[in-house]
Amino acid sequence: MDQQVAQLREERRRKYFVRGVAFAIASGMCYGLYTGFLTLAETQGVWGEWFAGEPWGNGNPALSAFVITFVLAALAAGINDFFSGVWSLAMCAKNRQLGDFWKTVKTKPGWIMILCAVIGGPVATIAYIIGLNSATAAGNPGVIVPIAALNCAIGAILGRVFFKQELNAHKIVGILICLFAGALIGGTSFAAMGPEALIGCLFAFIAAFGWGFEGCVAGFGTILIDYRIGIAIRQTTAGILELFVMFPLLSVLGGEAACIPNLASAAITSPALLIFLISGFFAMPAYSFWYKGNSMCGAALGMACNGMYAFWGPFFIWIIMGVLDLGGVAADFPPLAPIQWVGALIMVVGIFCIAVNPKNLLDKRNGKEA
């Protein structure tokens, strides 16, 4: 009887673990779609005029380099995350969880989610979009995505430091492979694209560090609360902070406080807003499935599976802006050069080395053959 109970528990644990891995993989695919539509949105309407450094609207002068680099990144991040928060709240309403949402905000796990929003929103997401915009200006937006995917390696290290999670030989090898792939992509980008690529890769690394830390914290928080509520707290908080704190604050720091109303009005009335609505929709499962996967299969493995967006990000940028020609870009639009695609695939290998112990796979295979 006890043996049957133990077998049932093990089967249930295995199914739970497999579901967690599936959530984490799906989050990486959604992250690639979110990145693709966000990149598209920032090339359309008034956004295209802003980033081209042209006069815009009713005789408004071209924006300064500081505004283009930092202020627009905060504005884009805020719009995207705000829409993502709206989608998340709609999902909570559909599942009759709005009451639980408000109750959870006041609890310790709720405050952990708010902390995740501070780390992942104003810090990581804005840094990611700064990197994405810098790479887009250099003609290759997909190049920074694999650099940002280093968050899985960073998360594995931080998980060991803060939560005493296991960091054995195969994970260390995987981390080294990821770092090598990141250096390969970054070095090739700098050689081919110039200093804009260096700036993009630098901010992508900042994003990777922020998301790596957030993944460790979020994995703990979503063990205690429903992941749908967790992402609703995270995204609404991030959107509010980015739109109403970081966007005006960066405008003031850049000496462009007077442009805040005009930029906000132009962004809200631009047709590109509908594309931000789509990117925000995909950002919801990108983060919520990431949180859910981390809580079910561990931060290191969850972020490793999620980190496959090192491939999915450039892939969907190519599909959306190149193959489908939604942004008016040629079909041969290259999100990555051939050697950079190789680097992205190497990083995927490193990610799975972090997640899976090859020795265990060989032992299981040999056991089956025996």
Image (spheres, helix red, strand yellow):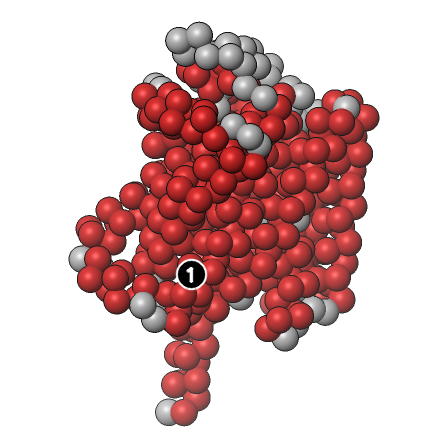
Towards the viewer: 137 or 26: 137
Residue 115 in view (yes/no): yes
Residue 35 in view (yes/no): no
Q: Position of residue 31 (x, y in %)?
A: 48, 41
Q: Quadrant of residue 347?
A: top right
Q: Residue furthest bottom?
A: 2
Q: Residue furthest top?
A: 59
Q: Quadrant of residue 253?
A: top right
The residue positioned 77% from the left and 54% from the top of the image is 176
Residue 221 vs 39, above or below: the answer is below
Please name the amino acid that badge 1 sits on.
Answer: Met
Q: Quadrant of the C terminus?
A: bottom right
Residue 177 vs 259, above or below: the answer is below
Q: Position of residue 163 (x, y in %)?
A: 59, 73
Towards the viewer: 90 or 289: 90
Q: Position of residue 337 (x, y in %)?
A: 70, 25
Residue 173 in the figure: left or right of residue 341: right
Q: Quadrant of the N terminus?
A: bottom left
The residue positioned 47% from the left and 37% from the top of the image is 247
Residue 340 in the figure: left or right of residue 83: right
Towards the viewer: 353 or 94: 94
**Number of numbered discs present?**
1
Q: Position of residue 282 (x, y in %)?
A: 40, 39
The residue positioned 46% from the left and 12% from the top of the image is 60
Residue 105 vs 307, above or below: the answer is below
Q: Which residue is mark 1?
A: 113
Residue 361 vs 310, above or below: the answer is below
